[in-house]
Structures are given as C-alpha cells and as structure tokens.
Amino acid sequence: MFERLPVPAQFDRLIVAGGIVTGVILGPVFLVLLSLLLVGRISAPELVFWLGFTVIVIGALGTVLLQNIVHAAFALIAALIGVAAMYLLLASEFLALVQVLVYGGGVVLLIIFALMMTNAQDDPIVTDGSQKPFAFIVTLLFGAVLVAAAVNVQWGAESVSLITFRDFGTRLFHDFMVPVIIVGVLLDIALSGAIVNARPNIEEHSEETTQ
Amino acid sequence: MIPLENFLILSGFLFAVGLYGVLARRSAILILMSVELMLAGVAINFAAFAAYLDADGFSGMIFALFVITVAAAEVGLALGIVLRLFRERRTSYVDAANTLKW
C-alpha cells in the first residue's frame, strides 16, 4: 500500500502501527462518549472536551514514556493537536490555527530534523536516567498540588465570549503593539543566535589546535 | 457548559507530565519536547482564564499567543545548541555536557 510513496521502509510500518494503536484506544472512548451524548448525559462540547482530553493524556504520556525518540515525537504531535482542540473549545479560533501551524508544522518538524542530524549510532537505547523514581515522586506531588489548588478554589462567574479574527488582529496590533515589536526582536535574536551557534566555525578549531 | 476546573486540571496534568519528562530524560531533544508540553499546559491555563473569568477575554489569549511565539524561538535556539553539542561530543545526551568550557 505504501510502496509507491517516497518514504523509508520503517516509516510505513510506523504509520500503520500508529494508526492501529490510535484506533484501538480512541475508538472505544469515542463510542462510549457518543452513547452518553445520545442518552443525554453530556453535551456536544463536553464530548469534544473528553475526546481531546484522551488524546492529550495519551500523547503526553507517550512523549515522556516511549523509549524510541521518533515515536515520542509523533506522540508529541498528537498531544499538541489535542491542545488545539482545547483552544477551539475556549472560543479562540485564531489560537487553535496558530497552534496547528506553529507546533504541528514548524516545531515538530524542527525536532525531527534535529533527530535526523544527531542520530549517533553508539548512543545507548535507554533514554531515561537513573533519577527516574525521584522524578516520579516530585511530579506526583507537584501535580497533586496543582490539581488540589484548581479544584478547591471558588472561581467567579463564567462567561465565554468568542473572539473573531478581525477583532483579534485589530486589538493585537493596536493595544499590544510594543509587545509584538519586542517579540519580533526576540525572534530575530534567537534565530540569529541559532544560526551562529549551529554553524561550523573553522577559526575556533584552528585556534584550539595552536594552543 | 464545561466547568473551568476541567481545563485547569488538564493544564496541571500537562505541566506535571512535562516536568517528569524534563527530570527523567537524558536526551536533550526529549527534554526539549517535554518543555513544549509544559508550555502548552501554561498556554491552556492562560486561555481558559481569559475565556471564563475575563469579561473582555482578550489579554489571556494574547499571552497564550506570546507563549507560543517564545516557544518557537526557544526551539530554534535550543536545537542549534543541541547540534553544537552533538558536533563537539558526538552525542545529544545531556550527561555529556559536563564541562563549562572545552
């Protein structure tokens, strides 16, 4: 099926296996949520929320638990697409589109490129350090504090207001003009620094040899 | 109507999972991916508070947008550093970066 596509042989197995895993996990969840919706226990936004919640939880856990780095990168894509669904539920369509474009398109692509360029053959397979139990305990305590803090507080009146594209752009470049300029300068500096950092500089190496 | 607490719990979960990845992983690229998860959790928090508690509902969205922008810049710069580390030490594991100057 994938023989005509110009992808490496390992990739088609990855795609098929990933699709099967996604279907096996998400299919039952979707069916349960759909039956709940038909019975009337949950509303349609809640169905989308819990579906996105499942995708984010599985993607995030896959990102930090999978041993293969490429598999972890694909799990990261799933988690970030789920986050885009959350932005849609929060009535901010512009943020959802930016999330898909910047993360799903740019950031993960950069990460996979870096994986290709730093693929050392003699690296050990184990990608976790020996500090794993300690990290697990710290994370558990920290997450428990966050969740307890979120649940125990009485928040104010709830009101969701949709922000349209035109409104967003007008107010972004009118009220927040200075932060936009500062972020532009920051991006410029960061990308120049990345180029300077990743460039092979011959002078430095020749200096080192003469010392 | 989805309660605000659901979004807060989700963002707390994402932040905690990302923290676990940062603490437990050895590969610099995997640590970077976990940082992305933490930033996504923070951005969800901003957007949720803006949508639910702010009558205007705009400032939090702007902050989420800036978080995304700064995360993109950070990924570009960090991957440059990872490439440099790989060129010097032939590995991308943070254990290898154990000297300040070489």
Image (tube, helix red, strand yellow):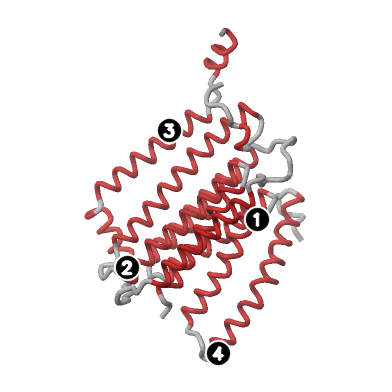
- Asked whether B54 or B16 is in front, the reply is B16
Is A70 placed left or right of A168 in the picture? Answer: right
Residue that mark 1 sits on? A65
Label 1, label 3: how many angstroms apart (C-alpha)?
A: 33 Å
- Of label 3 and label 4, which has the lower sequence position? 4
Label 3, label 4: how many angstroms apart (C-alpha)?
A: 54 Å
Which chain contains the residue that carries disc 2? Answer: A
Between disc 1 and disc 3, the foreground one is 1
Which chain contains the residue that carries disc 3? Answer: A
Q: Quadrant of residue B89?
A: top right
Residue that mark 3 sits on? A192
- Of label 4 and label 1, which has the lower sequence position? 4
Residue that mark 2 sits on? A163
Q: Position of residue A70 (x, y in %)?
A: 66, 50
Label 1, label 2: how many angstroms apart (C-alpha)?
A: 37 Å
The reply to whether callout 3 and callout 4 are in contact (CB within 8 Å) is no
Which chain contains the residue that carries disc 1? Answer: A
Q: Where is residue A196 in the image (x, y as percent from the top left)?
A: 47, 28
